[in-house]
Image (cartoon, coloured by chain):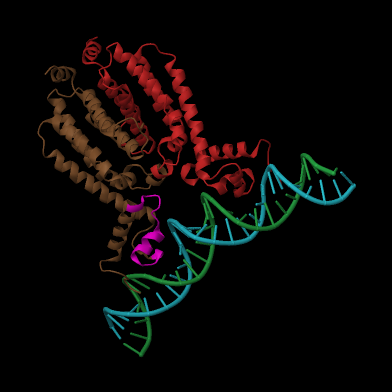
Chain colours: A red, B brown, C cyan, D green
DNA sequence: GTGTTTAACTTAACGGTGTTAACCAAGAGG
DNA sequence: CCTCTTGGTTAACACCGTTAAGTTAAACAC
């Protein structure tokens, strides 16, 4: 049979089925054969449109990065004050991870070995979100609000911290006695206090 | 053949081979059949000593947690000043992760679905390391050195931040222009500034 | 209108995986 | 000497990603 099932190019339908399966059953049980079964084609048909499973997953990862970046860009455009903007960006990142756990997992939590094949050229696109934080940090530093050395390194360190928080949250590795909201709040406030200039911090604390 | 190959109980030899394979080839290519081949027994023999592959990996994870805790406990015993001790604990954690990437991966970076089966009772043992940080934070808070609310939550947030740093480092997801040492240094200094009381911070900055 | 090419897809198969069921050989106890 | 238990084995099932070869239908040349 040719183009079995509903309409739309097979490539598009493969991606839709893959994303659906990913969300429904998680990355671990995502298999070529299941995808094929879901759309009523043979497993090998997928290889006409994707070099292999990794390539397919990478396409999903691209989708995820685009989604995340659009959220961050929109958020960044809403705030003028560097401190407010930075905090908003951070919160939005965490929100994205918690709301899209399956995307987040394939984007950031896949095994290193598997991800080394993810083309480095695409990493640059993926880092556009970080650039928003870097610019904000740089801007605030010029105004004497942030006491940091290298904005790029600081932004990366903060990103790593948020990633760790999201990762542990998604993996449910936190002590059950800890409230997730409290945990996130503490993470962000600690980071913020870590980058703010001491005098600004005192000023904030006094009022 | 009975008890093929060298001496030692088969159970012990399975664990040794598994750990060796894990370190040599990474978690992804760790398979029951490979372990069996390495020690010259049949794949099914492993099931006489471990319920399944997960149970085997969990035993390796236990080893890892014991190793990590011993390092942290030894480190904690070497420093009296809470600030110094906290920083030393944090550095030691990062060092463990970077020196034992395979252990770190199965301990903290395995897929959530797989890890949910890891018995919650064992998590408590795994958290003993965190208790060291909690106690240190509590101690420093009583002395007015740390401006934090809940030591348990703060310790968890800091742990998450360090985990994120290690995870991104091991997964080689950092911008290539960023020096890993610089990155770690910034992470730890930011965290420290985030938990220190503002006046202590100013005092530190002035001298 | 017929012959040929090409695009889209299929079936069969290879080598790998975790895991289970059934079997077997050697030693221990009566 | 016979039975039971211990500590393994072999064979098999159902899955996986991937490749090679085959098929079928549409498109095009003449």
Q: How many marks?
A: 0
Q: Quick one: quadrant of the C terminus of chain A?
A: top left
Image position of A84 with respect to B49: above or below: above
Q: Residue at x 39, y 23 (%)?
A: A131
Q: Tell me where the magenta segment starts and ends, as one range.
A: B24-44
Q: Is residue B192 visible?
A: yes
Q: Residue furthest top?
A: A207
Q: Position of residue A62 (x, y in %)?
A: 50, 33
Q: Residue at x 18, y 30 (%)?
A: B137
- Quadrant of the image occupied by residue B173: top left
Image position of A26 with respect to B194: above or below: below
Q: Position of residue B53 (x, y in %)?
A: 38, 55
Residue B38 counted in the magenta span? yes
Q: Residue at x 16, y 17 (%)?
A: B202
Name the side, left or right, on which A179 lies relative to B192. Answer: right
Image position of A187 with respect to D18: above or below: above
Image position of A96 with respect to A105: above or below: above
Q: Residue at x 27, y 41 (%)?
A: B98
């Amino acid at each position: 049979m040719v183009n079995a099932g509903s309409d739309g190019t097979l490539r598009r339908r493969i991606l839709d089925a893959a994303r659906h399966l990913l969300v429904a059953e998680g990355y671990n049980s995502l298999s070529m054969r299941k995808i094929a079964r879901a759309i009523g084609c043979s497993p090998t048909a997928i290889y006409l449109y994707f070099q292999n499973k990794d390539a397919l997953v990478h396409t999903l990862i691209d989708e995820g990065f685009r989604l995340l970046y659009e959220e961050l860009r929109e958020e960044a455009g809403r705030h003028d004050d560097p401190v407010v903007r930075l905090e908003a960006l951070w919160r939005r990142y965490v929100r994205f991870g918690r709301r899209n756990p399956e995307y987040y997992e394939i984007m950031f939590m896949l095994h290193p070995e598997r991800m080394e094949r993810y083309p480095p050229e695409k990493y640059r696109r993926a880092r556009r979100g970080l650039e928003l934080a870097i610019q904000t940090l740089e801007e605030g530093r010029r105004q004497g609000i942030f006491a940091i050395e290298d904005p790029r390194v600081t932004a990366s360190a903060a990103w790593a911290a948020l990633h760790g928080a999201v990762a542990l949250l998604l993996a449910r590795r936190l002590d059950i006695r800890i409230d997730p909201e409290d945990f996130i709040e503490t993470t962000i406030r600690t980071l913020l206090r870590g980058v703010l200039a001491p005098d600004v911090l005192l000023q904030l604390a006094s009022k």
